Amino acid sequence: MRIEEMNEGVQILLERMKTNPEEFETPFGKWQHIIDQIMGRKEGVKTIVPFLYDEEINALFEGLRNMERNKFTADILRGLADVTEEGEQLNLPYVRAMMNPPKRGELSMATLSRATKNLMDSTHTKTKKQTYDY
C-alpha cells in the first residue's frame, strides 16, 4: 500500500512519530490508546480498529519500532557520553577492566577477592581526602 492510499490519520501519526516521539512514550503518552490498539491488532485481534487495513497497522507498528530503536540508540549514546536526557553530566565512577581476565570457568572466590581488592586499592589511593571548614 502506497502512503497516498493510507488513511490520513495513519499518515499523520507516522509523521508525528518522527517529529514528536515523546508523545508516544508509554505508559502515559498522549497516544497510548492508539499504541494499545496497534499492539492488540498485531497480536491478531482483528476486531480492534477493523476499519484499518493490515498494511496500515503494519506501517504504524514499524513506525513505533523505528521510534523505539532510535530511542534505544540515543540512550546508548547518552550513556557513552555520561549525560542525562537533559544533557547534565552524570560523573559516573570509572571502573577499570581486568588486565588478564580469567578464562571461562576459572573464576574463583580468590580471583574475585583479589580483583575486588585491587579495584578498591586503586580507587581509594587516587582520591584526595576532603576536609571541610565550618
Image (cartoon, rainbow, N blue to C red):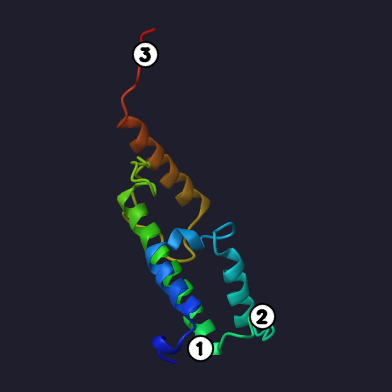
Percent x, y for residue 65? 47, 73
The residue at which mark 2 appears reads as: 48
Q: Which of the two labelled residues, at mark 3 and mark 2, occupies the earlier sequence position?
A: 2
SS at mark 1? helix
113 horizontally vs 125: left or right: right
Which numbered circle lies on residue 132? 3
The residue at which mark 1 appears reads as: 55
Q: Nearer the viewer, mark 1 or mark 3?
A: 1
Query: What amino acid does circle 1 point to?
Result: Glu
Q: CA distance from mark 3 to mark 2?
A: 64 Å
Looking at the image, residue 16 lies above or below residue 128 = below
SS at mark 2? loop
Percent x, y for residue 1? 44, 92
Query: What amino acid does circle 2 point to?
Result: Ile
Which numbered circle lies on residue 69? none
Percent x, y for residue 29? 55, 59
Q: What residue do we see at 62% from left, 70% from top?
A: 36
SS at mark 3? loop
Q: Nearer the viewer, mark 3 or mark 2?
A: 2
Q: Which of the two labelled residues, at mark 1 and mark 3, occupies the earlier sequence position?
A: 1
Residue 98 in sight from this viewpoint: no
Residue 6 in sight from this viewpoint: yes
Q: Which of the two labelled residues, at mark 2 and mark 1, occupies the earlier sequence position?
A: 2
Q: What residue do we see at 35% from left, 15% from top?
A: 131
